[in-house]
Structures are given as C-alpha cells and as structure tokens.
Amino acid sequence: MRPPPCFEEAGTLRQQARAAGMDPNYWYAVEEVRRVRPGSVVEIVFWKHSIALFRGTDGSFQAIENRCAHRQLKLSIGHVEGCRLVCAYHGWEYGGRERPAGVPYDGNGRSFPRLALKTYPVKVRYGLVWLFPGDPEQAEQRHIPEIPELEGPGRWTCVPLRFTWSAHHSMVIDNVSDFTHAHLHRRYRPFDGATLTTCETVGDNVHLAYDTRVGRGRISGLFVDHKRLDTNSMKLCYEYPYQWSNTDDAIKHWLFVLPMDERTTRVFFLFYFKSLKIPFLPVRIPRFAMTAVMKISNRVLIAPLLAQDQFALEAEQEGYEKHWDARPVEFNPVVKAFQEVTVRKWREYLALGPEEGDARV
C-alpha cells in the first residue's frame, strides 16, 4: 500500500492540505502553564522539530532546540538548576541570565567557543505557554490573539482543555467549523439543525456563520438562559492558524492547534461563558463559583463531547492513509475554503527558502 503523497507530489486540494505544515512565524500555544512546574523541563514538538521548554526556579520560561551541542542528547531528559537547563550526560548548561543559551561550560568554569543552538521566544497568556517557532525577529510583529473577555478583573471564567490527537491539523480545523456532523454528537447536542448562511475568505481568514440551535443538550441546555440569549446562530472564523466561535457575545471559544507531524496534532480549547444559570431557576451562577462549575463541566460534558471528535478524526486519519487517492466528496464549502488557506499559507512559507527558517521537512 502506497503512503499518501508528500506536499510537493500531492495532486488534489485535499492531498495538499493533508500534507501541509503550518507557518512557524506565528505564536503557538504549546502547554498549560500549570503543567510545567518551576524547575522542570518538557519536550515540545512543532512540525517534527523537538524543542525543550523549561521553567526556571523563579517561574520564568525558556525554550531551546532540544539537543545538546556536545553529543546531541535531548536536553529534555536533563534537569533544571536555577534558570539553566543542564544536559544529563556531561552537565553542559544552557540558558539563564548570566550566560547566553547555547554556550556551555565545564565544571571548572572554563568557557568553550560558542556552539549555536536555536532559542525560541516564549510568552505566557490565558493560562497557556506560547512559543514562536519561526524567525525570532518576527516575534514582536506577530501577536497572540486578543481575548478581552479573559483579561482584567471582570474576566470571564475559562479552564483550558488540551489533548493530543492522531490526526492532521487540517482535519481538526475542518471538524470544528463543519457543522454538518451533528449526527456524531446526537447524544450531547452542542448544536442542531445547522444551515450555513455565510462563507467568505478575507485574506488569511475564513469567516462563516450558521443558523443553528446551540446548547440544547439534555444536561448542558439547563445551564444556558435561552430566554435571555439568542442561541440560534453562531459566527465562526478560521483566523489562520487559529479558530474561534461566537454565539450572541455570550458563549465563545478559541481553538489553538500545535501541528506535530502529518498525523499528530496537539489541540488547546478555551471555552468561556459570560454567565451560566442554575438549572430550573432563572438565577445566574455566582461568579465565585464559575471556576468550579467549569472544571466539572469540562470533565463530564465538554471532554466527552470532544472525545467523540477525537474518535472520528483519528478514524478519518486512518481512512485517509489507506484511501488517499479516493475521489474527494465534500458538500460543505467551508471545508474547501479552509484547505485553500492552509495550502496557500504553507506554499508561501516554503517559497521563502531554507535560509528563512528550518521548519520545512
């Protein structure tokens, strides 16, 4: 059985989309802050490139190419001392304020010639760690998405969710904005009866809207005040490389994907609500109790719902790998629009040439 074609050899739009990477010259969510404790290191993978993300004992984050310049061991199997990452083999150190990253030293303090390792800009926002895997000089020109509802003293409650799915990132984007798959979620009914009313590509963004009944599930529907909110329509956008939705400025979400390779994607969901009501009563849940409610909701409602998407997407990935040359059959125009943007952005990045970055594999 022949494997799916690489990007350069792909013929159809779908084949190209399923082989495309993502432009590294954007900020990507890579981990939840709470999961990287001070004094620890984790491995992050962006499009087949391994990166060591570590947190100093002072709480600050740094990221560096995940290999020691000496014997090429992964630095993520080392340990953190203060604000430096120490290789497990010979103890070469990287990072920290006193010594630039990539300049190791021996136990006697003798300096070695500079052995360059790539470092990556890192920021923290919305409970997530963000990394810029592309050209560091472009990091300040690009911006992490602005989510005003999650800023300031009156911010809405949000508890991030993160998963690793065995599916290409374009399949994930297709899934979250294609509302023709309500059958998959018939148990939870997050949306129902969707009719596409808008689909427009503007630059690198695909704007769409559906007339659909949102939040009508047997349990979840009890927490939404349908008398005060218009939950019969939803706006969405593939704001490359991110995705978001908005229902009546009261129910919103963002999706951030971290493309690891052609069949693996890490996903971060931020669901946030202006308010929720107490079931069977026209009374809002107090703000101080919203975090606890969201944690329970994530565990018993949202995570099981997303598990259905994971099941379908991983099955789609397996199906594509076996039948990649099957004739594409797609009825929802938004999917074609998403794939066109994904393919164009990857083609534009490849055209820059290898001197502009190293995420081309």
Image (cartoon, rainbow, N blue to C red):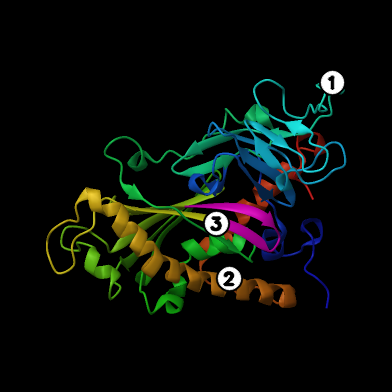
- Label 1, label 3: how far apart the Cα atoms are: 43 Å
Please state if 229 lies on the left or on the right of 68 as rendered: left
Residue at point 83%, 28% (across, down): 106
- Magenta-tinted stretch: 255-267
Q: Which residue is mark 3?
A: 267
Among all residues in the image, which is located at the extreme left? 282
**In front: 148, or 5?**
148
Q: Are marks 1 and 3 in contact (CB under 8 Å)?
A: no
Q: Could you tell me how far apart the alpha carbons at marks 2 and 3 are, in whole angstroms?
A: 13 Å
Residue topped by disc 1: 110
What is the three-letter code of the residue carrying label 2?
Leu
Q: Nearer the viewer, mark 2 or mark 1?
A: 1
Q: What amino acid type is highlighted by mark number 3?
A: Val
Q: Is residue 106 left or right of residue 341?
A: right
Residue 81 drawn in magenta: no
Q: Which residue is mark 2?
A: 313
The residues bearing labels 2 and 1 have C-alpha atoms spaced at a distance of 53 Å
Q: Earlier in the sequence, mark 2 or mark 1?
A: 1
Vertical arrangement, residue 136 with respect to residue 260, above or below: above
